[in-house]
Image (cartoon, rainbow, N blue to C red):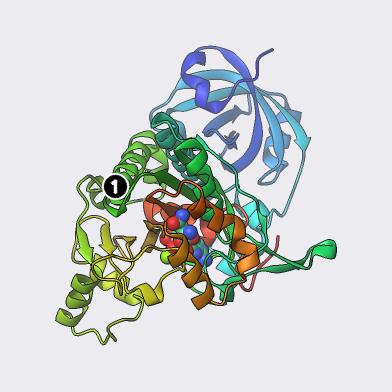
């Protein structure tokens, strides 16, 4: 027999069927018990009339606690007033695992308690909606690049050197070979891939030993990183804006009911369409000045600065040409203004901050070697990377989008901890 899910109920109206799932909630009214079944695809109200079922079944319906796993049988009818739009006239109930005192009840719980019980919290309506949106974002990301002829190329997780600065490296002993590090970004490997395949993307977990405790930082997060040969900063910004539009518009269309569960205000997301505004770092600093924000020219933009800047626009804003001194060693500098890097960050609206960081890459062997030395990075670990500038070097560019920040923004969440099934943060590595 084919297993039926709640999401398929439209094909089973008038039929007697069996569904398996968990008891989400229940209430009673005299001789009627209403059990709300959830199966991960939806919710269904199952109605047990005392007259229609044996006393044993009726008493079981009365007794079992929230999150008991059960099998229900009955006839499906349309019921616009019920959750999900259908209802079951139940005639049977089998208990697979009876449970009582499930720790997460419909009442309010503190967030630390819920984080400790994350393995159970994932079953709640909101968390299910977030996970389904996360999945759809991942699919949209992959579809976008796959449809444009990019090749997915998986970089290593264990790496010999830093990519994004040495202060956030997770270190480990690697047999007789000394220290190794968890990757901060797949980019350097994506650059090798772009020289092999023209356009590639990496998509996987990345690690930062972030000592900051903010609502935007995880120590383990997922990043997608496209890299394109024969592409400059403008090509990179064109790609990034087309990509963001595709991802956001697809998710709005494909996850309407989940966004509704989260009570997401869609008016702001609807605006995420090309062209996105493009401003230079200098123009961004002007905005801060006009808003009487104290800011020292030459510094990187902080989270608060990013919020002020993004508030000036009705959609994500691209900030390019940052001072080279605050950016990564691999970024190419503007040949006409070498104190600036050919970098671009994209700031999301509504205070979600930087979701994309990218740049054109330094393609000259001599200049790249100079940067590696200026940053006190070990040359031996970068010989292979320097080779890419020795053998057929070309202008090339790419960017990285943080998946969890994107999920937080699209879902309208207060904190990044709910965007990933089991978050890793400075003060949490369990469950
Ligand atoms: O700006 P970042 O550090 O850029 C890179 O890693 C480049 N190698 C990307 C590239 O050009 N291929 O990180 C890129 C994005 C950020 O914009 C942010 O969305 C996310 O990764 N990110 C984090 N997300 C959650 N927690 C953290 N600790 C993050 N650090 C960066
Ligand atoms: Mg960045």
Residue drawn at (34%, 51%), measured in percent from left and top? 264
Quadrant (top left/top right/bottom left/bottom right) for the C terminus: bottom right
Figure quadrant of residue 209: bottom right
Q: Position of residue 362 (x, y in %)?
A: 41, 60
The residue sitting at the right extreme is 176
Q: Check the picture and name the quadrant holding the N terminus.
A: top right
Image location of residue 147, percent across then percent down: 40, 29
Instruction: Please give the name of the residue rendered at 37% of the width and 40% of the height, measured from the top-left corner.
Output: 251
How dense is the environment of label 1, judged by Cα within 10 Å: few (below 14), some, or many (20 and up)? some
Residue 113: image quadrant is bottom right
Q: Horizontal and vertical percent for residue 160?
A: 67, 62
State whether residue 126 appears in this view: no
Quick check: is the Cβ at mark 1 less than 8 Å away from ligand 1? no
How many numbered markers are drawn? 1
**Residue position marked by numbered label 1 in the rendering:** 235
Closer-to-camera residue (312/260): 312
Q: Residue furthest left?
A: 290
**Is residue 220 depicted above or below 411 in this figure?**
below
Q: Position of residue 8 (x, y in %)?
A: 51, 21
Which of these two is toward me, 4 or 171?
171
Tell me the element at label 1. Answer: helix
Q: Give the side of residue 46 with respect to residue 172, left or right.
A: left
Q: Is residue 83 visible?
A: yes
Left or right: where 304 falls relative to 223:
left
Nearer the observer, 48 or 114: 114
């Amino acid at each position: 027999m084919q297993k039926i899910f709640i999401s398929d109920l439209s094909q089973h109206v008038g039929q007697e069927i069996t569904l398996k799932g968990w008891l989400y909630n229940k209430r009673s009214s005299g001789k009627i018990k209403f059990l709300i079944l959830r199966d991960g695809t939806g919710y269904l109200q199952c109605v047990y009339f005392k007259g229609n079922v044996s006393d044993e079944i009726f008493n079981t319906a009365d007794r079992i606690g929230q999150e008991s796993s059960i099998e229900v049988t009955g006839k499906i009818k349309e019921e616009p007033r019920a959750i999900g739009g259908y209802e079951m006239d139940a005639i049977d109930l089998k208990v697979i695992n009876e449970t009582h005192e499930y720790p997460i009840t419909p009442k309010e719980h503190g967030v630390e308690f819920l984080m400790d019980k994350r393995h159970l919290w994932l079953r709640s309506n909101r968390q299910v909606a977030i996970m389904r949106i996360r999945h759809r974002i991942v699919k949209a990301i992959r579809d976008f690049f796959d449809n444009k002829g990019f090749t997915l190329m998986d970089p290593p997780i264990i790496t010999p050197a830093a990519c994004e600065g040495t202060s956030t490296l997770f270190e480990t002993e690697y047999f007789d070979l000394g220290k190794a590090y968890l990757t901060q970004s797949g980019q350097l490997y994506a650059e090798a891939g772009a020289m092999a395949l023209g356009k590639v993307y990496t998509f996987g977990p990345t690690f930062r030993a972030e000592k900051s405790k903010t609502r935007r930082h995880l120590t383990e997060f997922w990043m997608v990183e496209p890299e394109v040969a024969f592409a400059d900063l403008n090509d990179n910004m064109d790609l990034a804006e087309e990509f963001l539009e595709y991802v956001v518009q697809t998710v709005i269309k494909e996850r309407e009911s989940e966004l509704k569960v989260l009570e997401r205000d869609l008016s702001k997301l609807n605006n995420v369409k090309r062209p996105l505004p493009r401003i230079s770092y200098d123009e961004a600093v002007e905005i801060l000045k006009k808003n009487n924000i104290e800011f020292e020219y030459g510094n990187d933009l902080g989270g608060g600065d990013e919020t002020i800047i993004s508030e000036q626009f009705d959609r994500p804003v691209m900030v390019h040409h940052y001072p080279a001194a605050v950016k990564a060693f691999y970024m190419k500098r503007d040949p006409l203004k070498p104190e600036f890097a050919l970098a671009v960050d994209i700031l999301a609206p509504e205070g979600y901050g930087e979701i994309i960081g990218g740049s054109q890459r330094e393609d000259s062997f001599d200049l790249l070697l100079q940067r590696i030395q200026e940053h006190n990075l070990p040359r031996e670990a970068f010989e292979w990377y320097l080779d890419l500038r020795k053998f057929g070097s070309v202008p090339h560019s790419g960017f990285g989008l943080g998946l969890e920040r994107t999920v937080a923004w699209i879902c309208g969440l207060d904190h990044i901890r709910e965007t990933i099934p089991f978050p890793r943060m400075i003060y949490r590595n369990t469950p």
